[in-house]
Amino acid sequence: MPKRLLHLLLPAFTGALFVAIWYAIRYAMSEEMRFLLPTPGEILAALHDNRDALGRAALNTTEGALLGFVFAVVISAALALALSLSSLVRISLYPYLMILQMTPVIIFAPILVLWVGAGIKSVVVITFLICFFPLVVNTTQGLISTDRNLVELFRMYRARRLQEILHLRVPAALPYFFTGLRIAATLAPIGALVGDYTAGSSAGDGGGLGFQAIIYSSQAKYPALFATAAVTCVLGFVFVAVVVSLSWLALHQWHDSYERADT
């Protein structure tokens, strides 16, 4: 069997098996408890019935996730460059970055509502906080992990510091950067969902998927709640797919991992 066909059949078989197990668990439950686990068919029906509300919520969540993600990329790249240029800067700032990462974001939500108000601004800030740390850590690690032999070669030829950064350290850090970018792309929709859930607002149809989840949960609309989760998963897949495509465009012609994959 051709390898490409096998790569298509195996996920399809796994998905079919998962759905079969889902239905088996559902029908093994007592009649009174089956409402807690809607079937895929019921979820698809709820997705169709609530498509307008979920569509608006998905657009609002996408806006918050994308803005927070972009701000995290830009600010983390600038900070990573500063951290890589000076060990004193790294020693001074890194402990506080760790403290920021270990502080549960949900604690910031009430504070952010007071500072910037409920709604999209708070969602963007929460998404930024969730995405920022993996980006800055991976990018910094890439910038300081450049091959020492190549660094010495650049210095032997009296390359300026800016040339060393642009032509050596930045290209060498790209695989690390895209690793952090992929992690952040996975976390961005989750961050926006958490932001919607904890600091969102429905004013002016501004509620996102997290706010919509609160509504469906309070109304005991469990198929619609699962449909909301499905839309969030699709949003996450879109974010990751875009990052994977950018990574392939930037690295496939020279990075070892893509070269091995092509041979």
Image (tube, helix red, strand yellow):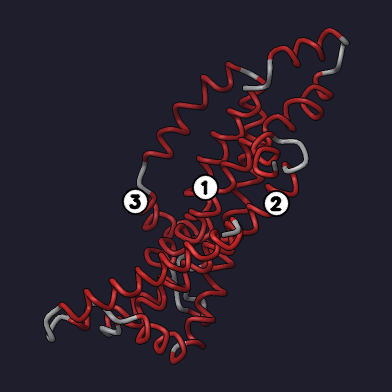
Q: Is residue 138 above or below residue 237?
A: above
Q: Point out which mark residue 198 bears.
A: none
Q: Is residue 143 above or below residue 8?
A: above
Q: Point out which mark residue 107 bears.
A: 3
Residue 32 appears in which quarter of the rendering?
bottom left
N-term mark: 2 or 3: 3
Neighbor class of circle 1 (other Cα within 10 Å; few <14, some 14-19, many 20+) is some
- Name the residue nearer the viewer: 176 or 193: 176
* Residue matched to label 1: 183
Judged from the image, the secondary structure of the residue bearing numbered disc 2 is helix
Residue 137 appears in which quarter of the rendering?
top right
Q: Is residue 67 visible?
A: no
- Name the residue nearer the viewer: 55 or 247: 247
Residue lying farthest to the bottom in this orientation: 49
Type of the residue with mark 1: Ile
Type of the residue with mark 3: Ile
Q: Position of residue 29 (x, y in %)?
A: 15, 78
Q: CA distance from mark 1 to mark 3?
A: 22 Å
Q: Position of residue 186 (x, y in %)?
A: 50, 54
Q: Is residue 20 above or below residue 11?
A: below
Q: Is residue 119 visible?
A: yes
* Residue matched to label 2: 246
